Image: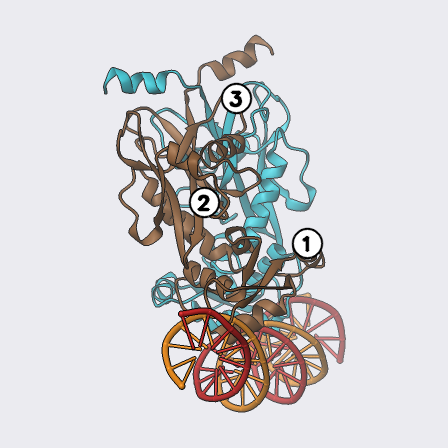
Chain colours: A brown, B cyan, C orange, D red
Amino acid sequence: MTNFTKDFYIQKDRMYVATDCIIFGFDSGKLKLLIFKRRIKPYLGEWSLIGSFVKLNEDVSHAAKRVLHEITGLDNVFMEELKSYGAAERDPGFRVVSIGQYALIRISEYDKELVAKHGAHWYDLEELPDLVLDHNQMVKDALERIKRKAKYKPIGFELLPEKFTIPQLQQLYEAIYQKELDSRNFRKKVLSLKVLVKLEEKDKTSSKRGAYLYKFDDHTYQQLLQSGYNFELS
Amino acid sequence: MTNFTKDFYIQKDRMYVATDCIIFGFDSGKLKLLIFKRRIKPYLGEWSLIGSFVKLNEDVSHAAKRVLHEITGLDNVFMEELKSYGAAERDPGFRVVSIGQYALIRISEYDKELVAKHGAHWYDLEELPDLVLDHNQMVKDALERIKRKAKYKPIGFELLPEKFTIPQLQQLYEAIYQKELDSRNFRKKVLSLKVLVKLEEKDKTSSKRGAYLYKFDDHTYQQLLQSGYNFELS
DNA sequence: TCAAAAGTGTTACAAATACACCCATGT
DNA sequence: ACATGGGTGTATTTGTAACACTTTTGA
């Protein structure tokens, strides 16, 4: 690198870049969020999303995955950038630009010990406490994103166990859209998409009769995508 | 701020934060992009999006507006965050996280002298040259965003003059969706949305008969939005 | 036997698509 | 008078929304 080039960068302002994870789960018919009580200053004792500063030699997306892994023990989780939070005064400590990333995890699979160790808790979305900084706004933005995205991408399945029942799936979409759906229409539509595989097994945890379990068939879904198909579910 | 707090930040990595603007226009039935030939190192002489480093005391969104104003003379332009580009090695000079922002401008309104002064040019989207760094990817991502967004938000009007004809509007949507639309169906649908005001004037630049000019009625649109309306145009 | 959730079809309505001709005007 | 783009209507298909009863089974 020439001196000229070096000068070009050297005179600019450098700042912290962080990433905050908005981690969603789904349990007992409700959307949940994983937040934690901060054990260090600043904001000791306050509720916060899970985040981290991005290291100089680390991709932003990697930082988010690292954080998520540290706290849940999970890898290969659905995670996507939400947006950046770049107001100059958002963090009174020092200038920090944060990249919000939302993750959808199967709530049954996370490492409970690890979560407890970090002082993290699953909260009902409706009963969220105040979070530090602009973290409540991040949650709100993430929810809206999920609501919209669920209409054209099968992201719902990321929140369910690998095997799930149609009523569970419906509950999930009702939680996301925050409105009730007609079970006949929902079943008709979701099955017409042809991306569910019906299993022989039944799940009897929520009824005596039991409901058939299904699996999401990602392979078929990918084929549909390539043939110009547009997933849609409302 | 306590010493503890200071320490908390001080030991972290600081990096440059930049913003790059993907500036779209629409002219002669085609989508255009405003790019410029760099006049300073690094990448002297190469084509690039317009961008800037974010200053320590400046909102990220403000930096983007500043850049856009510097180069086009325009304020109050539709601009929205696209996503961040945060790969560790994306800029070989030094670690730079860039926030991509896309803007839709009325191509008739920009300051031509200013644009020329900065070495900027409007390029047909299909004939874009290679751009520096990951800028081509940014353009691709922005186009996809616009394609999707145009289906549920009336962003198209940001690219047209205040007064426009239905055929112009259709051409625009054909350029965005990259497919031809049926003029009868298009007209029917767009008029059914009730957000266009028909004027008495005609535009005769593209036909002898002339086509009626319309204006977008943002007031009515805002009312529709609040009553739970969902703009849709395909 | 009864309570509780699972599963199933049909009809009415709305929206999307496909499709072809006349109109107005400047040259 | 003719070439060019502007403007209009209808029929068909497709998808969405509304709606109620029977089935299964554990307690």
Residue A195, horizontal then vertical, whole percent: 64, 61
The image quadrant of residue C21 is: bottom right
Residue at x-position 54% and y-position 40%:
B22
Same chain assignment for discs 1 and 2: no
A137 or A50: nearer the viewer: A50
Residue placed under numbered mark 1 in the picture: A222
Residue underneath mark 2: B80
Query: Residue under mark 3: which chain is it in?
Result: B
Task: Between label 1 and label 2, give the one nearer the viewer.
Answer: 1
What amino acid type should be assigned to the residue bearing mark 3? Arg
Residue A51 pos. (x, y %): 41, 33
Residue B152 in view = yes
Q: Residue at x 23, y 18 (%)?
A: B2
Judge left or right: residue A180 versus residue B159.
left
Compute the Cα span from label 2 to label 3: 24 Å
- Pointer 3: what residue? B95
